[in-house]
């Protein structure tokens, strides 16, 4: 199911890199069928130069739920395009590889890739097995620099869950240049064999975001936001949203 909907500033909830330079707080709630999503974020500092790039940190938050209280579909892929007033720079930051994070809890991941850390926060994942009550699993979020090669910058978003068995969920974010701006693709792996869906998240990312504000806004487009119904709940097998938003800056 495809709906033309406005997309929140921080949709990169799982696309953290794509919004690393957004300069002004924004929040929006969008709906498709029984799926209700709220995303938002703000940058530190809120005021940035008009004609030159400056470093920024970004707080990103979001919530995913359903109107009838059922288990929500799982967010699996997000594509975000941002105009030329925002860029990502990982120069000089140590690199971590996905293989170093797999099968490691948060403490172990930081031991091997601590110097590559560029963000942190927390999330809640809901695990829903057939004929069982949902299980809420709180987890730390840690964002690592995955390096730059061949014009592509990678970020790795690490979440560790403890149910049904301890497991690391590592979201791969690939960033490339597009029309002077940036194009980011986040692919979220299947969680708990398809039984897991993110309910909320809140994290801050820094070190890599740069932005300027020549015209008072950033143009953000999300041509694809894909949710999959992997737990077999009533409703469509997948839901795809898309849209655009002009985000104000100062």
Image: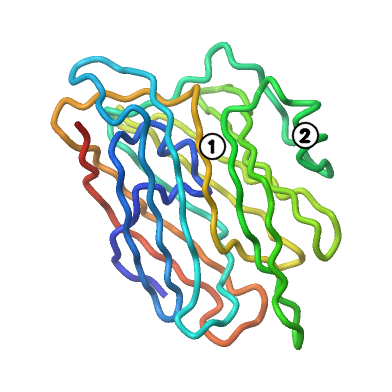
Query: Which mark, by number, is residue 174?
Result: 1
Q: Quadrant of the C terminus?
A: top left
Q: Nearer the viewer, mark 2 or mark 1?
A: 2
- 113 or 237, nearer to the observer: 113
Depth check: give the residue in front, 119 or 148: 119
> In the rendered image of this protein, does residue 33 appear above or below residue 137?
below
Name the quadrant containing residue 135. bottom right
Residue topped by disc 2: 109
Hey, which residue is sitting farthest top in the picture?
A: 92
Residue at point 79%, 36% (across, down): 107
Classify residue 77 as left or right of residue 221.
right
Q: Which mark is residue 58?
A: none
| Colour style of the rendered protein structure | rainbow
User: What is the x, y in percent for residue 194?
Assistant: 71, 68
Q: Secondary structure at mark 2?
A: helix
Pick whichever, 79 or 139, lies toward us.
Answer: 139
4 to 208, vertically: above or below: below
State the image coordinates of residue 236 (x, y, percent, origin top left). Answer: 51, 81
**Relative to 221, residue 96 above or below:** above
Query: Which of the two labelled residues, at mark 2 and mark 1, occupies the earlier sequence position?
Result: 2
Disc 2 and disc 1: Cα gap in Å? 20 Å
Considering the image in quadrants, where does the N terminus appear? bottom left
Q: Residues within 10 Å of mark 2 (few under 14, many from 20)?
A: many
Q: Residue at x 65, y 62 (%)?
A: 125
């Amino acid at each position: 199911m495809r709906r033309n909907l406005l997309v929140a500033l921080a949709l990169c909830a799982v696309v953290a890199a794509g919004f690393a330079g957004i300069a002004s707080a924004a929040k929006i709630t969008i709906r498709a069928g029984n799926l209700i999503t709220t995303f938002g974020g703000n940058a530190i500092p809120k005021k940035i130069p008009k004609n030159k790039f400056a470093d920024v940190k970004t707080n990103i938050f979001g919530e995913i739920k359903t109107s009838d209280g059922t288990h929500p579909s799982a967010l699996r892929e997000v594509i975000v395009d941002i105009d030329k007033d925002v860029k990502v720079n990982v120069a000089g930051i140590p690199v971590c590889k996905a293989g170093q994070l797999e099968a490691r809890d948060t403490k172990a991941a930081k031991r091997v890739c601590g110097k590559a850390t560029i963000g942190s926060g927390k999330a809640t994942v809901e695990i829903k097995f057939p004929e069982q009550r949902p299980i809420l699993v709180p987890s730390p979020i840690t964002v690592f620099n995955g390096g730059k090669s061949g014009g592509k910058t990678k970020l790795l978003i690490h979440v560790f869950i403890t149910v049904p068995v301890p497991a690391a969920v590592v979201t791969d974010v690939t960033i490339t240049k597009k029309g002077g701006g940036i194009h980011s693709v986040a692919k979220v792996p299947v969680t708990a064999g398809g039984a897991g869906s993110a309910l909320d998240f809140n994290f801050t990312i820094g070190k890599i975001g740069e932005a300027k504000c020549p015209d008072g806004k950033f143009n953000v487009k999300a041509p694809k936001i894909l949710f999959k119904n992997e737990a077999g709940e009533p409703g469509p097998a997948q839901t795809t949203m898309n849209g655009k938003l002009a985000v104000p800056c100062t």
